Amino acid sequence: MTRIAENLQAVRARIAAAALAAGRLPDDVALLAVSKTWPAECVAEAAACGQRAFGENYVQEAVDKIAALAGLGLEWHFIGPIQSNKTRPLAEHFDWVHSVDRFRVAARLSAQRPVPLGPLNVCLQVNVSGEASKSGVSPADLPALAEAVAALPRLRLRGLMCIPEPTDDVALLRSRFALLRELSEATRIRGIAADTLSMGMSHDVEEAVAEGATMVRVGTAIFGERTRRPV
Ligand SMILES: *Cc1c(COP(=O)(O)O)cnc(C)c1O
């Protein structure tokens, strides 16, 4: 087995164990393999092990990989910060965007989504860490943003995403993930269908799954330490 194959198997085992420990089904937690900075060959290797969904943070790097691997039937998720003037390649090349945090970006993605592709799946990134983090909509502003985004014709609002501040404090992490779950439940109560909770990375898969994550975004534990910025 290759290193990526072994790592993938280990990450899937971690997800399954965490799900079972929380009284959940392993299949209810999807794995997004975060391939930023890693070349197309590494993605192809993971794809050969059955991994279909890949996450990318840098637009040009991602668009090149998507082109190189077209035909493998992969699903591409954009998870990085979004510049308002760089939305078009996201609308044209991705299946999901997890990091929508303002209406201006959502409106542009909707307007630029090519009709033949079907609606673009989006998650709203929420700032669950307060002062400690700058990106993401505040919990207070989330209901209005969710309502406005849900009404856009070429987007399908799928749920919420968060990136808690880096910390080794497990209780603090759990509370950040729990807040996202509560906000997601409140969003559904308001009549907005949202089935996805995108939370948890290499070091905190267990905490995120315990708090209800339906999609974990794992890079380092699959591909290894990133030693460079993207190409
Ligand atoms: C890089 C990144 C990840 C993956 O992080 P790892 O610690 O390598 O697992 C997940 N989510 C986002 C938004 C990222 O930028």
Image (cartoon, rainbow, N blue to C red):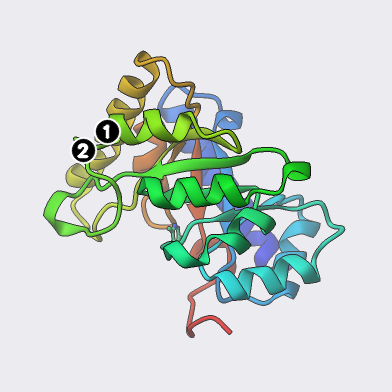
Disc number for residue 175 = 2
Instruction: Report the residue at 76% width, 50% height from top.
Output: 50
In the rendered structure, the answer to whether residue 206 lies left or right of residue 112 reads: left
Asked whether mark 2 lies closer than 8 Å to ligand 1, one says: no
In the rendered image, the vertical position of residue 161 relative to residue 34, given as above or below:
above
Looking at the rendered structure, the secondary structure element under dot 2 is: helix
Q: Do labels 1 and 2 touch, CB within 8 Å?
A: yes
Number of callouts: 2
Q: CA distance from mark 1 to mark 2?
A: 5 Å
Name the foreground residue: 191 vs 200.
191
Above/below status of 23 relative to 217: above
Instruction: Inspect the image, locate mark 2, and give the three-letter code of the amino acid beneath it.
Output: Ser
Residue tagged by mark 1? 178
Q: Nearer the viewer, residue 220 or 190?
A: 190
- Residue 67 at what x, y percent from top left? 77, 68
Q: Say which residue appears at 59% left-offset and 61% top-offset.
A: 88
Quadrant for residue 209, please give it: top left
Q: Residues within 10 Å of mark 1 (few under 14, many from 20)?
A: some
Q: Mark 1 belongs to which amino acid?
A: Ala
Residue 22, x across and y down, in percent: 40, 27
Q: Work out whether 230 lies above or below 53.
A: below
44, 112: nearer the viewer: 112
Q: Which image quarter has ligand 1?
A: bottom left
Q: Residue at x 47, y 66 (%)?
A: 85
